[in-house]
Image: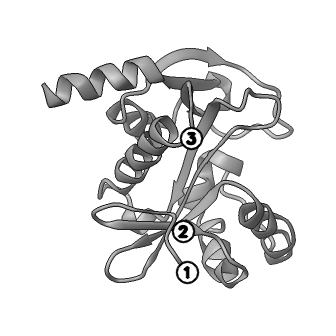
Amino acid sequence: MRPVLETDRLILRRFTDADADALYDLHNDPAVTRLINGGRPIPRAVIVGETLPRFVASGFFAAIVRPTGEFAGWFHLRAPEGVPADELELGYRLHQRVWGRGYATEGSLALIDRAFTELGARRVFARTMTVNTRSRRVMTKCGLRHVRTFFEDWPETIEGSEQGDVEYELLRDDWRASRDTATA
């Protein structure tokens, strides 16, 4: 399958039905999903029947480590429902075994560049739980800045949810200015 995007160490490609096992393993690692659903297992039928078809049909990318071919996790870059088409949400979920290697930052930076150079984005934003310091650090490394803390009603409370969620953003003009500074 032709990659959608390649970085120095990652290949980002569209999901296929053949990714069911890899996605199931990722979404059933309690360390990975602790701040998503409290680390509860997700049934295979949900992954195969709901999650994977949604990933195949929309802006989700399987992240593959070069040159080993290891499935590292996923990224997404898309305008969520109800958000203007020029405001793209960045997201990622990676296996615990690849944490701390810079893959989240590397993949995110590549998608941010694509958002502004090819997709006509005015704004890229990302959200996470306030307590998710690892994800917040990635957002900051990618040039996004904190714009708000907010509280939503979730069906189930998980550890840290009482501190709310945060949103970070990067505007096209700020992205352009940071690139101009870096090349000056």
Left or right? Give the position of 84 relative to 133.
right
Q: Which residue is denoted by mark 2 in the rendering?
A: 13
| Residue at the (70%, 38%) spot, across then down | 79
Left or right? Give the position of 41 relative to 26.
right
Q: Which residue is denoted by mark 1 in the rendering?
A: 1
| Residue at the (35%, 24%) spot, across then down | 176
Q: How is the image coloured?
A: one colour
Q: What is the secondary structure assignment of the residue under circle 3?
A: loop
Q: Residue furthest top?
A: 148
Report if the CB atoms under discs 2 and 1 are less than 8 Å apart.
Answer: yes
| Residue at the (30%, 66%) spot, across then down | 9
> Which label sits on residue 119?
3
- Vertical side of 176 occupied by 48: above or below: below
Residue 168 horizontal/vertical position (percent): 51, 25
What type is the residue that disc 3 sits on? Leu
What type is the residue that disc 2 sits on? Arg
First in residue order: circle 3 vs circle 1: 1
First in residue order: circle 2 vs circle 1: 1
**Crowding at label 1, few (<14), some or many (≥20) Cα neighbours within 10 Å?**
few
